[in-house]
Amino acid sequence: MINIFEVNETNKMIDQENLDVRTITMGISLLDCIDANLDRTNENIYEKITRKAQRLVAVGEEISREYGIPIVNKRISVTPIALVGSSCCHNSSDFVTIARTLERAASCVGVNFLGGYSALVSKGMTQAEEMMIRSIPEALASTEHVCSSVNVGSTRTGIDMDAVRLLGEIILETAKATRHQDSLGCAKLVVFCNAPDDNPFMAGAFHGVTESDTVINVGVSGPGVVKTTIEQVRGQDFQTLCETIKKTAFKVTRVGQLVAEEASRRLKVPFGIVDLSLAPTPAIGDSVAEILEEIGLERAGAPGTTAALALLNDSVKKGGVMASASVGGLSGAFIPVSEDQGMIDAVSAGALSLEKLEAMTCVCSVGLDMIAIPGDTPASTISGIIADEAAIGMINAKTTAVRVIPVIGKGVGDSVEFGGLLGHAPIIPVNRFSCEAFVARGGRIPAPIHSFKN
Amino acid sequence: MKKTIITVVGKDKVGIIARVCTYLAENQVNILDISQTIVQGYFNMMMVTDTSASPKDTGTIAEELTVIGEQTGVVIHCQHEDIFQMMHRI
């Protein structure tokens, strides 16, 4: 029988340490919505999403009430739209009509975000995929809930540098198209290398073509719980620290598994995966940077940060894997700048630079995330940042991503407010030396060798 | 059987248990076990209940108990037992 202390421990995690289930994401395949006629494709998409996800939000709220655990977001991911629209879209504007259909469907079912306005171009772009990528600025400027992602590289294929070059321009155009909202459109656009097919987190969620028709994926959270628990082992050795993180990750993930099973049962949709990520929010005490500080760093970004993050990430995975029947998605600690108060403070204090953030992405999920950069950053420099990050992912066989926001009209010393879970951030300086000639080469960086790992 | 855990945390005073038990009786919720302790000067009570005979669902009972908690100045949670089983038992 469960005892009062165990009940109190769980409720303390929820009430005081921000334990929550970050998202229930329903993946929906749109492959059966494809038609040569654009209007019919749009109708099919709207019909399928609203039918499949009709009860998603209500069921999420029902589970939340019965178990007393907050479920922050209910979301949808769909098949990459570049595939869905390839036979009926003849220009970028045609693709934008699909984005608007997705927006209507998302509003109808009441989800927070819908991801999958995406293209997978890790080796090359088809004509349709290039048109879809070129439609991203208008699509994101004219919708509120639609999220976009592009996979530009993988360990098996190398990096499509034509896509990388194009995306530098697209990110800048998206920033300009949403300049009246502090370039918020860029917060809904992620560029990946080795993108997972089953990621429930935004903005990078899409429903991969390897997935079944409909699936439920759940993302857990709980940086605050980890931080509070490791306060108990302050000053003790690394083995003790790692064991403590593992046990906490296990408990947090079990809640995610329970919610995933329940959602799957009530919605009659198969359970896919639990994503083990530590996802911070701007709320005090819900920060990954604060965990790093508790591990022993004065600020995130100090020497030792990469090692601390590596042990944190690895321990979370070790604890979480046993707690869930099926683990997937991004699974690791997120280090978004604007969504984590400790990271914001570290950047403001000058402890954390873009280069140190890049180093940190080598050992954790997912990449350079929610980083505000000066609005006058050249497109080629953004492409260079993407190429660097994709190279880390490609060589190390891990997922990496870039979600930077060039804030039009603002520079270093300014700060930007996105609101809600997206938070706020100081603008971070970017290396001013040019990589234009490098980016201008075009073509593809060949796939890496898979032996001689040094 | 739908087992639900009800917890009451707050400053100790007369009638807390009576108020909660009256509500449960009115709504056909059967109490299977009660334990109580004082932690750092605060009254902590945990009840294991069976809600399967109740005309109300667990979510509604949880919401109504929260309101009773607010009226009496204590925090009342009502949660399905599975969340604790999942977290604390392999």
Image (tube, rainbow, N blue to C red):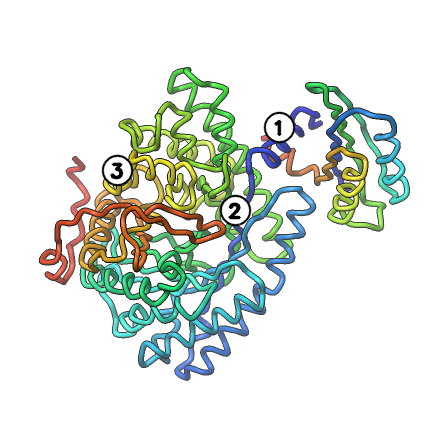
Depth order, front residue of A446/B12: B12
Task: Find disc 1 in the rendering and name its residue.
Answer: A9
| Label 3: which secondary element | helix
- Residue at the farthest top position: A236
Q: Viewed as shown, does residue A167 lie left or right of B27?
A: left
Residue A58 is at least partly visible in this image: yes
Q: Amino acid at mark 3?
A: Lys
The reply to whether residue A399 is in sight is no
**Residue hosting label 3:** A356
Q: Nearer the viewer, mark 3 or mark 2?
A: 3
Q: Quadrant of the N terminus of chain A?
A: top right
Q: Are labels 1 and 2 assigned to the same chain?
A: yes
Pointer 2: residues within 10 angstroms few (<14), some, or many (20+)? many
Disc 1 or 3, which lies upstream in sequence?
Answer: 1
Marks 1 and 2 sit apart, C-alpha to C-alpha, by: 20 Å
Location of residue A131 with respect to B12 vertically, above or below? below
Mark 1 on the same chain as mark 3: yes
Q: Residue at x 34, y 39 (%)?
A: A348
Percent position (x, y) of residue A83?
36, 70
- Amino acid type at circle 2 is Arg
Nearest to the eye among marks 1 and 3: give it.
3
Q: Which of disc 2 and disc 3 is earlier in sequence?
A: 2
Please report, as a chain letter, where disc 2 is located: A
Question: In terms of depth relative to the viewer, which is nearer, A318 or A342?
Answer: A342
N-terminal of the pair, mark 1 or mark 2, is 1
- Tell me the residue that label 2 is attached to: A22
Which quadrant holds residue A258? top right
From this view, report whether residue A46 is shown above or below residue A450: below
At horizontal 44% and vertical 41% (from top left) the residue drawn is: A277
Total numbered badges shown on the rendered structure? 3
